[in-house]
Image (tube, rainbow, N blue to C red):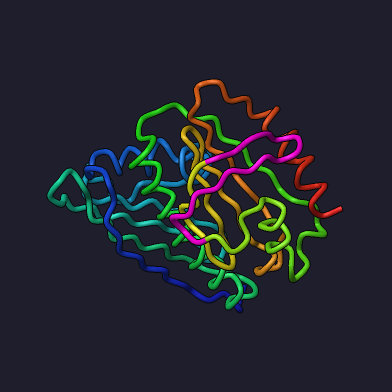
Amino acid sequence: MANNREFEIVADTELPGTPERVWQAVTVDTPAWMFPTDQWPAVRTVDEFPGHLVTRMDGPDGWFNQLEHVLEPVDGGRAKLHYVHSGIFADNWDEQYDGASKHTEFYLHTLGQYLEHFDGRPVVFTDIQAPGSSQAADGFRRLKNALGVEGLAAGSTFDVDLEGVGQLRGEVDFANDNFLGLRTDDTLYRFFGRNAFGAPVGMTVHDFSGSGDSELTAKAWGAFLESVYA
């Protein structure tokens, strides 16, 4: 553990929800915009609703992972968020820091999409990983080509028919070299180009339709990803 190095990722953003709604989203509704965190052994070291929350996990030899949210109300029912993620990376510090920093931008953007379009609606969350072959240098570009959205910028509309998945139409809400967000009337689709960080490409589906089935979603998208990287 002697090679451990501490890190700190800081982000400031404004969100389309009151501090109370943002607090709910980052404490309870995480499957709606990130992933379920209800089983994490995190301790609230600061718990001052609805303005200041710090959660922390500690491990052997000084390891820790800590998230801090500072929320202030803004006119129009919005909130200003000051976010700090700190802790220790044990290996591949530069690669892990780069990946975590870029994931932070995407997750906080998705938090805003949830609050603006789906706040409070029940969600069915599904996490799907692409095959190991997606770790190739062109892995994420291949996925965007298969989705029919390569080259589309955030704000563009899309209308695609994917084999085994079906018709999807909506808006590209986020797009860069490593991440892609697609929003339909009832679902957020998040795509992660983790091949840039030494891992397979992944995706999550946040289904607010009221009729979502995680098992069927995983089967359909899993088969699609298998075909992309066959």
Residue at (31%, 54%) from the top-left corner?
69
Compared with residue 33, is residue 146 higher up or lower down, i.e. above or below? below
Horizontal arrangement in the rendering, residue 47 relative to residue 139 (left or right): left
Specify the quadrant of the image occupied by residue 197.
bottom right
Horizontal arrangement in the rendering, residue 55 relative to residue 13 (left or right): right
Tell me if I can see residue 41 in this picture.
no
Which span is picked out in magenta? 153-169
Say which of 12 and 64 sits in front. Answer: 12
Horizontal arrangement in the rendering, residue 100 relative to residue 109 (left or right): right
Specify the quadrant of the image occupied by residue 141.
bottom right
Horizontal arrangement in the rendering, residue 90 relative to residue 143 (left or right): left
Q: Per the image, is 121 magenta?
A: no
Residue 53 drawn at (x, y percent): 30, 50
Residue at (75%, 35%) from the top-left corner?
164
Residue 172 drawn at (x, y percent): 50, 52
Residue at (50%, 26%) from the top-left corner?
209
Residue 140 drawn at (x, y percent): 68, 62
Tell me if I can see residue 26 in this picture.
yes
Say which of 18 and 94 sits in front. Answer: 18
Residue 23 drawn at (x, y percent): 30, 42
Residue at (35%, 35%) from the top-left corner?
119
Residue occupying the far left of the picture: 75
